[in-house]
């Protein structure tokens, strides 16, 4: 088949009507444009991110090794009693996960900068928030996976046993992880075009994560020690997540199209 | 040459008025006034740093004018016309870890296209095998260029903005690409090709735009006219 024939095939099949004569807007073809579904583009972008991570395993491997090192090094550095463990474990676990998450958060946008793929997204009519949400959900899943793998090791190394209602650790983990990734994904996109983005991200992310980190650490410690209820910290995390998710969604389009 | 001479006589698909683009203190585009007619193939020529890529990115809506106005399809709001623009940059804009079809499927979905058909056809017109499962990162440079062109074509845009589509492509593939672009132009599309290989487009291009230091300094119908 000749190339010309191919061309006419495509022209016909994609209904690329020859432009009408007229000015400006009239040159657009009259073919019906496929509707852009925010949900579908989010899912497509999420599936793509999971596929890329599955093939490269860049973020998951880096996070796992980093967290593993923290657990092992700290377990050799300290020899806490069971009571001391309950008091420090909350801080130790969440700081380890926060640092590990930074690795994944940096990777997530770096992938879009290779070959300037982000420009292909910017010239498309897909909603900017679909890209942002897919990145945030992808990072959320990756960090949750990390937590699922590392938490049993933490429990084993520090001989942890919750004296309070252990089920409350679940909302703390879910809401706390979302708090880290929603801000992390947003600030990683801001630091995307800076030269030293690996340093820029923690500098932007850590100060704004302090309320969430405080709630995660205090909530976890309360449950492990059984001294206080964690309900207040869970409510704080929920409010934090709602505020920062809304703010990120409102601001992301500006960040994406910034030069 | 006066601005009036730079304007195309036909009714315009793109109107550029007093376009200035600055990056800090450096002005990449220094006051461009031009109109471009639909259904033509424009070759944008000039030395490195002449502002060719900056002009193309501004037309694509990737870069906002510092001053001046760009109207494409009668709209100066780039977000409303993204469905109708196909953009191919100097970098591939492809995911190296995914195969050609996986790349096209993903980018087609960004335009609301869920079917496989347009992706397969886009692969076929650039002479790539849709069944090739190799990741795009393992393609030769020429194959990547063709896949990049397929990505720009997959949603059937009326306006194609192509930045250096022939770079690192062998002579035969480049000639094939030129024939393909001429065919698309004949099908009614408006095409801008930024290139250093002007000779390749000598016969196919309807107009040659010469850029120097951020301005369009000459518009010619053919090589002979341009060199006079």
Image: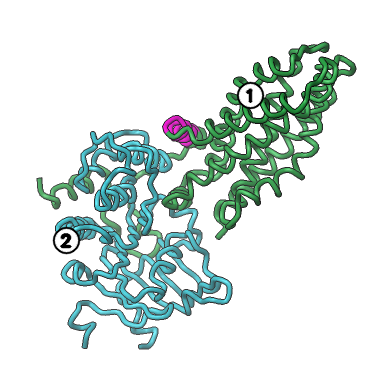
Chain colours: A green, B cyan
The residue sitting at 24% across, 43% down in the picture is B123
For disc 2, the marked residue is: B171
**Residue A165: quarter of image:** top right
The residue sitting at 29% across, 59% down in the picture is B165
User: Start and end of the magenta stretch?
Assistant: A43-55
Above or below residue B91? Residue A139 is: above
Find out whether residue B65 is within the magenta segment. Answer: no
Q: Nearer the viewer, mark 1 or mark 2?
A: 1
**Location of residue A30 in the rendering, given as x and y in whole percent from the top left corner:** 34, 50
For numbered disc 2, what is the local secondary structure?
A: helix
Left or right: where A138 falls relative to A220: left
Q: Which mark is residue A147?
A: 1
Near-viewer residue (B94 or A243): B94
The residue sitting at 28% across, 70% down in the picture is B196
Near-viewer residue (A64 or A193): A64
**Location of residue B182 in the rendering, given as x and y in whole percent from the top left corner:** 19, 60
């Amino acid at each position: 088949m000749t190339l010309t024939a191919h061309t006419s095939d495509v022209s016909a099949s994609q209904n690329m009507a020859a432009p009408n004569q007229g000015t400006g807007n009239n040159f657009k073809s009259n073919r019906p444009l496929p509707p852009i579904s925010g949900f579908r583009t989010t899912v497509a972008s999420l599936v793509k991110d999971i596929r890329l991570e599955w093939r490269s395993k860049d973020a998951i491997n880096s996070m796992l090794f980093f967290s593993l090192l923290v657990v092992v090094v700290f377990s050799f550095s300290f020899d806490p009693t069971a009571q001391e463990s309950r008091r420090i474990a909350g801080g130790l676990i969440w700081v380890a996960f926060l640092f590990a998450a930074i690795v994944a958060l940096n990777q997530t946008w770096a992938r879009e900068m290779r070959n300037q793929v982000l420009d292909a997204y910017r010239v498309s009519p897909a909603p900017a928030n679909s890209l942002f949400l897919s990145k945030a959900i992808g990072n959320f899943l990756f960090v949750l996976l990390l937590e699922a793998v590392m938490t049993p090791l933490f429990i084993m190394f520090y001989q942890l046993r919750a004296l309070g209602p252990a089920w409350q650790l679940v909302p703390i983990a879910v809401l706390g992880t979302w708090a880290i990734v929603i801000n992390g994904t947003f600030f990683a996109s801001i630091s995307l075009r800076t030269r030293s983005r690996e340093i820029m991200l923690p500098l932007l992310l850590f100060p704004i994560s302090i309320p969430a980190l405080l709630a995660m650490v205090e909530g976890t410690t309360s449950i492990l020690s059984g001294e206080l209820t964690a309900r207040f910290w869970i409510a704080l995390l929920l409010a934090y997540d709602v505020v920062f998710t809304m703010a990120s969604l409102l601001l992301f389009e500006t960040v994406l199209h910034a030069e | 040459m006066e601005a009036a001479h730079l304007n195309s006589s036909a009714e315009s698909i793109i109107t550029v008025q007093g376009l200035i683009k600055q990056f800090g203190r450096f002005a990449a585009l220094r006051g461009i006034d031009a109109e471009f007619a639909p259904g033509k193939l424009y070759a944008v020529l000039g030395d490195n740093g002449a502002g060719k890529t900056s002009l193309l990115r501004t037309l694509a809506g990737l870069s906002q004018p510092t001053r001046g106005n760009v109207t494409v399809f009668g709209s100066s709001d780039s977000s409303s016309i993204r469905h109708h623009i196909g953009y191919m940059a100097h970098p591939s804009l492809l995911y190296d870890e995914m195969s050609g079809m996986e790349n096209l499927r993903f980018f087609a979905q960004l335009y609301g296209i869920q079917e496989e058909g347009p992706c397969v056809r886009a692969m076929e017109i650039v002479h790539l095998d849709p069944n090739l499962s190799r990741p795009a990162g393992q393609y030769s440079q020429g194959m990547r260029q063709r896949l990049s062109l397929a990505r720009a074509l997959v949603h059937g845009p009326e306006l194609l903005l192509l930045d250096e589509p022939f770079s690192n492509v062998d002579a035969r593939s480049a000639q094939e690409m030129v024939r393909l672009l001429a065919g698309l132009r004949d099908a009614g599309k408006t095409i801008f090709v930024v290139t250093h290989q002007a000779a390749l487009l000598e016969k196919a291009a309807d107009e040659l735009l010469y850029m120097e230091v951020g301005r369009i300094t000459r518009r010619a119908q053919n090589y002979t006219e341009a060199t006079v």
